[in-house]
Amino acid sequence: MDELLIYFYTSLPFVVVLALAALSVAGIGIGMVAPRLLVYPYLAIFFLINSTNYGNLAIVSYGSGIYSRGSGLLYFSLLLWYVLGAWCCARASASFRGLDSAPCNLRPWFLGWTLLLLGHVVVAIFVGKKLSEALAPSGFSNIIWMAPLVSLMLLAFRTREHAVELARFIMLAGLGRALFGLARWAVGGGDPNNVYANMNAIKIKLTFFDINDSLLCVLAFSIAAVQLFQAAKVARPRIWTAFESMTLATTALCIVLSYRRTAWIGLVLALLVVIWRFPLRRRLQLIALGLPFVAPALGYVALKRLSQTKGAGGGLGSLAYDMQPRRFGAESERVVELKLALADFLSNPLTGIGSWGRYSGHQRISWQAGPEGGQFIHSGVLHIGLKTGLIGLVLFAGTVWAFVHFSRRALRELPPELLGLGTAGVAGLAFMLPDLLVGTPFPQVRTSQMLAVCLALPYLAMAATNAALAARPAVVTATASRNQPAPA
């Protein structure tokens, strides 16, 4: 028996390698035939697996698990190498079929980000920094990794049927995630990653602490709302109307019960984007119907949380109680963190402190005491400015401008069956605006990839629409040629 165990453990690494090789070959084959089948498992991971254990007293380490797996020797996680491999398969598949890439005005800006990162790598090596420090997620490398996912989705979902299929997948994923969160909140103690109860002594339980779960709910909510309330109705089985109604109620409630201020403000911004898609009369009807429910719910949960929060006063200003300068007494750590980072940015306004840099005085902040101290701050925009200076801020502004410029046109031209998908991408980014201002989106793999999903959706929906329009004349011509009488 002992000899068998020895043989087993000795051969185990070789078995694992052979299994991975077989899976890789199978994945390449699937990717060449149907690239979108490689996208769904990837999206499912980001939709359903938590990215942080922060606030969980039962877990000592706050590592990211699957989102950092393999990032030691490979510099980046295996998940990111997976999406790059899937993109290569989709690109090769499109080349064999003679298909061009769908138009996307984000490509030049992502190229600019890539060149900027290469410049930081060269400088880091020159000044004696490790390559792993220059490429670390705490810099801005996650922004570059958004490009393969955006391009992969545009290559994989080319037809109107594929785009509708993706919209339903996102909606059902959001519905399932919301039902899970609400059930755990109602029956159990809610999300165990409850920083408010576990670290701040606020007696509340919440659905999800991770902002990405609320973002998924917003994507599902937007798709369901547009399908239900748009003026042009799309013929579909009644079961989907039932799913959309359930999604609308559960996802909104799940976001409200997350007890995150950025999620509450983001929900309001996302609602404005969704409502703006409807005619004026329908907008007024939805506001009149929804406001009596949404406003009291948000007011109740905000009062419940902020009334137990030390330092929070009354009124709307209490939502930003820890981010406002004080005339008397010590500043909050949030304000100190931003001031210290801003001072370093102003000292290096053109190039920033480098992707590997740490801002001065970070030791004064309690959550910056670990080995990653000083490498991130609670402001996505200031994080970009601190690490890359005005060069990065110009690239950031250009990326945002390109998306907004395209999305405004896309949302006016999309057909009813794809309008929800395009709107979801815009609403998702509107939802994330508060987190971009006062959160840490770019150092997190899950958040940056979820932002990439939002970026891709309007382009994907528009590309599928154009493909359907291009195929229609060909069908009409073929039908007319078949109906012509044969020559005498």
Image (cartoon, rainbow, N blue to C red):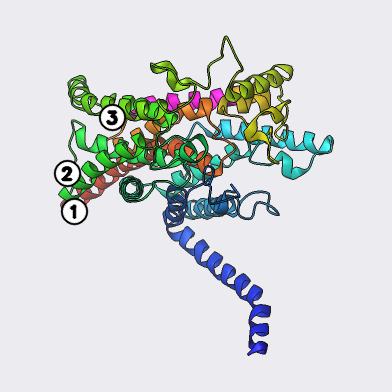
Q: Quadrant of the N terminus?
A: bottom right
Whole-angstrom CA distance, mark 2 to mark 3, is: 33 Å
Q: Earlier in the sequence, mark 3 or mark 1?
A: 3
Which sits in the foreground, 222 or 455? 222
**SS at mark 3?**
helix
Of tags 2 and 3, which is closer to the observer?
Answer: 3
Q: CA distance from mark 3 to mark 1?
A: 73 Å
All told, the count of numbered labels is 3
Q: Earlier in the sequence, mark 2 or mark 1?
A: 2
Q: Residue at x 20, y 53 (%)?
A: 482
Q: Mark 2 is on which residue type?
A: Ala
Q: Amino acid at mark 3?
A: Ala
- Dot 1 corresponds to which residue? 487
* Mark 2 neighbour density, 10 Å: few (under 14) some (14–19) many (20 or more): few
SS at badge 1: loop
Res 409 seen here? no
Q: Residues within 10 Å of mark 3 (few under 14, many from 20)?
A: some
Magenta part of the chain: 394-412
> On residue 297, which mark appears?
3
Q: Nearer the viewer, residue 421 or 107?
A: 421
Which mark is first along the chain, 3 or 2? 2
Query: Image point 66% across, 25% down: which residue?
Result: 386
